[in-house]
Amino acid sequence: MKRAVVLGGSFAGLLAARVLSDFAEQVLIVEPDLLDADGTGPGAPHRRQLHALLAMGHTQIERLFPGITREMLRGGARLGEGDAVRFYVDGAKKASVADSRMLGATRPFVEAHVRRRVTALPEVAWEHATAKGLLLRGDRVVGVRLETARTATGGPDSVYELSADLVVDAMGRSSRLGGWLTELGWDAPPVDRMRVDLGYATARFARGSELPDTVIAHATPGPASAYLPTLCEPGALAAVEGDAWSVVLAGYAEHRPGRDRAQFLARMKRCVAPVREVAERCEMLGDVESFHFRESRRHRFTDLTRFPGGLVAIGDAMATVNPVYGQGLTLAALQASSLAVHLRSGASPHAPARGYFRRAGVVVDAAWQLSTTADLAQPHVTGPYPRGYRFLRWAGDRITTASVRDAEVNQAYMDVVHMRRHPKALTAPRVLARTARVLWRG
Ligand SMILES: Cc1cc2nc3c(=O)[nH]c(=O)nc-3n(C[C@H](O)[C@H](O)[C@H](O)COP(=O)(O)OP(=O)(O)OC[C@H]3O[C@@H](n4cnc5c(N)ncnc54)[C@H](O)[C@@H]3O)c2cc1C
């Protein structure tokens, strides 16, 4: 390829650009936000919320950028291993698993490191602009229409065109790709939606000598509370760069957390011990930032019988799932890996990218299955119900209960949570038999 154009320079766009730098002479990242200062531009305001990087996502990022973990640790991130990473259900700590390992860092910090590595690639350049549409010739996308970004001096000629061998939509949830396709006479991919009405709130605290052995603590409601916040407030904390704790609280519908500092602290005190301790001993730095996530959304590109060549979508532009399961960044990394496999197979970038959408669709479907099956336990979430839901719910409740007591069941559970295994691994006879034995023993 002479030129690949990536629309959107956030997490998914950066990973796509890294992959494309192996295949194209030039990779142009089109992004309207200037992300040099604190790395939280208006195009992706959810960056301010605490983001977990799942084990699979971390592995993929280290593979794409060898040595990046070491760089982040030098910059103040923490690496939690063993019992420094703790998961709780209904307030009870889950059984320890052998290979538990998670990074303690904020999303802007991780993204800044990725951005620096991508920007340093000789093939990569940035275009400070907003994408406005696709250029089509026959049945192939041959370029994009751009508009000079808001902060630059726009003028009557601020709309311009760029040719491309491959265009990547990494514009996140706000992508208008479906609309652009229909305007050009093509079908938009069908969209699955699940309304979850989730609220998130994140605050930063000064980190001192308290909790020296904790990097990540994560609490969710489970079967004992019918997945409601009655036994324990849902939330998480991470030891992050800048000697700080980042604390997130989550809640659905009328239980969505707000920005009030006193209420935030009061809710932290109803969470698990490490979160309580930070509320009691540490000073809050700055304001509470909140975010309202209304619905999960999956664009089913694989359902389309006709699709133009020279075009793919990645990250939230393809699917955006309930963030409480922390899958978004890892999903983007696995999609980037699918793109690399697709291009390495010798597929022409000018042809419809069916192989890519099929591969990426497998990971999207896995993430969708895990998150939507779990979300349906919430009384205000009313469907759609997948086939076999009653069995999945029944088995899921029991596996969750057993995972608190038993390391082997928890290992199987955490492999799925960290996206190292497909959710169907949880219904393998070995896991179900072990779960039955653990619950039988009481
Ligand atoms: C509250 C919340 C908490 C989350 N927590 C986690 C977590 O713990 N772990 C996890 O893995 N994931 C989490 N996620 C999901 C994660 O944030 C997303 O999956 C991730 O941001 C997707 O990256 P992206 O690059 O696809 O999209 P985005 O990060 O949304 O970026 C889209 C980019 O496209 C640009 N753009 C938009 N329109 C245009 C245009 N017309 N032209 C050019 N550029 C454009 C925007 O400026 C932006 O930079 C969370 C999400 C939310 C909402």
Image: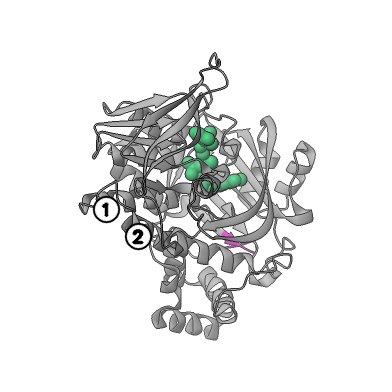
Secondary element under disc 1, as helix, strand or loop, is helix
Picture coordinates of residue 368, whole percent (x, y): 51, 62
Quadrant location of the C terminus in the rendered image:
bottom right
Picture coordinates of residue 297, whole percent (x, y): 57, 56
Picture coordinates of residue 387, whole percent (x, y): 55, 78
- Find out whether the residues at labels 2 and 1 contact each other: C-beta distance under 8 Å: yes
Magenta stretch: residue 91 in it? yes
Q: Is residue 303 above or below residue 54?
A: below
User: Label 1 is placed on what type of residue?
Assistant: Val
Which numbered disc, 2 or 1, marks the residue that appears first in the sequence? 1
Count of number-bearing discs: 2
Q: Which residue is mark 1?
A: 341
Crowd around label 2: few <14 · some 14–19 · many ≥20 (10 Å): some
Asked whether, in this view, residue 117 is left or right of residue 230, the answer is left
Does any atom of ligand 1 lie closer than 8 Å to the CB of label 1?
A: no
Q: Is residue 46 above or below residue 218?
A: above
Secondary element under disc 2, as helix, strand or loop, is helix
Closest to the observer: 192 or 410? 192
Picture coordinates of residue 128, whole percent (x, y): 47, 23
Q: Residue at x 36, y 61 (%)?
A: 358
Crowd around label 1: few <14 · some 14–19 · many ≥20 (10 Å): some
Quadrant location of the N terminus in the rendered image:
top left
Q: Residue at x 47, y 32 (%)?
A: 109
Q: Is residue 168 above or below residue 419?
A: above
User: Label 2 is placed on what type of residue?
Assistant: Arg
Give residue 279's quadrant in the image.
top right
**Can residue 211 be spotted in the picture?**
no
What range is drawn magenta here?
88-94
Magenta stretch: residue 342 in it? no
Asked whether, in this view, residue 17 is left or right of residue 148, the answer is left
The disc at residue 359 is: 2
Give residue 359's quadrant in the image.
bottom left
